[in-house]
Amino acid sequence: MPTPETRLAELGVQLPDPNPAVANYVGAVTVGEIVFVSGHGPYENGDYSYKGKLGRDLDVPTGQKSARLTIVNLLASLKAEVGELDRVKRVVKLLVLVNSDPEFKEQHLVANGASDLLVEIFGADRGRHARSAIGMGALPFGISVEIEGIFAL
């Protein structure tokens, strides 16, 4: 299996600089062999994109693009914390928060935008993970998706 960085390059994905924190927190914290990565959103070119509610303003494929961009941003913070993504032995858990219209019930499909990319990057053995996908009434800045993660080194 190629390294995660090699897989990213093969997929044409370049990790950006980590998102700036927007409040009193850090992007990632390592405790022993576990890394906790703070919630990230669909940030690009200095601002958040994919704003709005799923099921009202955005459809599932657009939500999946938002989740994919969000996990790329999360991986940038993870890499900044650990040095090389190949140090990750396992993606343990994702919490995917989806800004949803009250009638929207496909948060799990939106979350696949992040989960699928992690499996592509780390492979099934390291990349498949536990996950929660939860509909929210609102998210910061009106973003459509926020994701936090836990990783084992």
Image: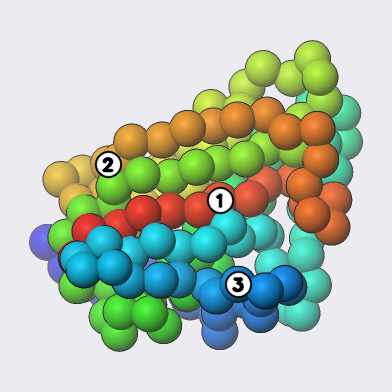
Residue appearing at x 55%, y 41% in the figure = 96
Q: Which mark is residue 99?
A: none
Residue at 21 percent across and 54 percent down: it is 90
Circle 2 residue: 128
**Toward the viewer: 38 or 84?**
38
Residue under the point 87% across and 28% down: 56
Task: Name the image quarter holding residue 86.
Answer: bottom left
User: Image height check: is 81 above or below 137?
Assistant: below
The label on residue 25 is 3
Q: Position of residue 65 (x, y in %)?
A: 62, 49
Instruction: Answer with left or right where residue 92 lies relative to residue 50.
Output: left
Residue denoted by label 1? 147
State which tag comes first along the sequence, 2 or 1.
2
Residue 34 percent coordinates (x, y) = 26, 62
Tag in front: 2 or 1:
1
Mark 2 to mark 1 CA distance (whole Å): 16 Å
- Frontmost residue, 4 versus 29: 29
Evaluate if marks 2 and 1 touch, with contact meaning CB atoms under 8 Å apart: no
Q: Between residue 57 and residue 37, name the one nearer to us.
A: 37
Q: Quadrant of residue 42?
A: bottom right
* Residue placed most toward the observer, 85 or 10: 85
Amino acid bearing label 1: Ile
Label 3, label 2: how many angstroms apart (C-alpha)?
A: 27 Å
Q: Determine contact: label 3, label 1, CB under 8 Å.
A: no
Can the viewer see residue 13?
A: no
- Is 148 positioned to the left or the right of 23 in the image? left
Tell me where residue 26 appears, x and y as whole percent: 55, 75
